[in-house]
Image (tube, rainbow, N blue to C red):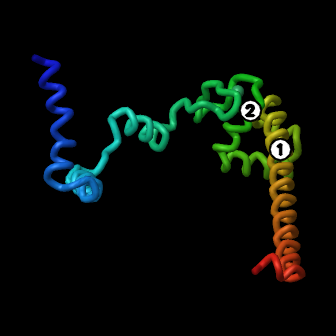
């Protein structure tokens, strides 16, 4: 009995196609129906899990994973490990502290900063600053190369009008 009912269910739409509407009209009607069904549906909302993940990412600033190394991180307190990546991520989050430390280092010297924040902090701070400088330098280099290649490309196109047509 069950098998028979299933077969009948499967068969009935195609019977409708051939008998009532013809093979050409049916796909159009089908698309229109799908669109109408979509419009009738309520807008898609995030699942509870997705929403929690987003909220965690945007509003919770507690123990996020430091990039790359994946160590657990304390946002407020400086890293207790000697992991440079943790320190980089942590210092990157504390712009004010970095500025203060930089000023102290420039004006009062390394010993003063060590007395203020400790030897590990100063070592990591100096690495952070030189990493930043290098990243900035490389970014500028890439930017310069991009500008140069764009200029070259433009003038090349002018030199070879065939490429434009
Ligand atoms: Zn780490």
Q: Quadrant of ligand 1?
A: top right
Residue 70 percent location from the top left of the image: 65, 27
Residue beneath the point at 31% across and 47% down: 44
Disc 2 beta carbon < 8 A from ligand 1? yes
Above or below: residue 54 compared with residue 41: above
Position of the N terminus by quadrant:
top left
Q: Provide the residue designation for mark 1.
A: 131
Q: Provide the residue designation for mark 2.
A: 85
Quarter of the figure with residue 131: top right
Most foreground residue, 39 or 60: 39
Q: Which mark is residue 120?
A: none
Whichever of labels 2 and 1 marks the residue nearer the N terminus, that label is 2
Residue 97 percent location from the top left of the image: 69, 45
Circle 1 sits in a helix, a strand or a loop, which is it?
A: helix
Quarter of the figure with residue 3: top left
State left or right for residue 150 relative to residue 20.
right
Above or below: residue 149 compared with residue 32: below
State left or right for residue 38 relative to residue 109.
left
State left or right for residue 6 relative to residue 92.
left
Above or below: residue 28 compared with residue 80: below
Residue beneath the point at 89% across and 81% down: 159
């Amino acid at each position: 009995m069950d098998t028979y009912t299933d077969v009948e269910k499967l068969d009935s739409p195609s019977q409708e196609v051939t008998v009532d509407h013809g093979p050409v009209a049916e796909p159009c009607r089908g698309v229109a129906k799908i669109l109408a069904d979509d419009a009738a549906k309520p807008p898609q909302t995030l699942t509870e899990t997705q929403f929690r993940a987003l909220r965690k990412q945007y509003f919770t600033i507690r123990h996020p994973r430091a990039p790359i190394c994946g160590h657990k991180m304390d946002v407020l307190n400086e890293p207790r490990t000697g992991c440079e990546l943790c320190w980089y991520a942590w210092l990157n989050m504390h712009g004010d502290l970095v500025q203060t430390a930089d000023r102290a280092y420039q004006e009062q010297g390394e010993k003063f900063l060590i007395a203020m924040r400790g030897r590990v902090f100063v070592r990591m701070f100096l690495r952070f600053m030189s990493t930043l400088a290098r990243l900035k330098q490389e970014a500028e280099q890439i930017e310069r190369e991009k500008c140069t290649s764009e200029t070259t490309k433009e003038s090349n196109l002018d030199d070879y009008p065939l490429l434009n047509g």
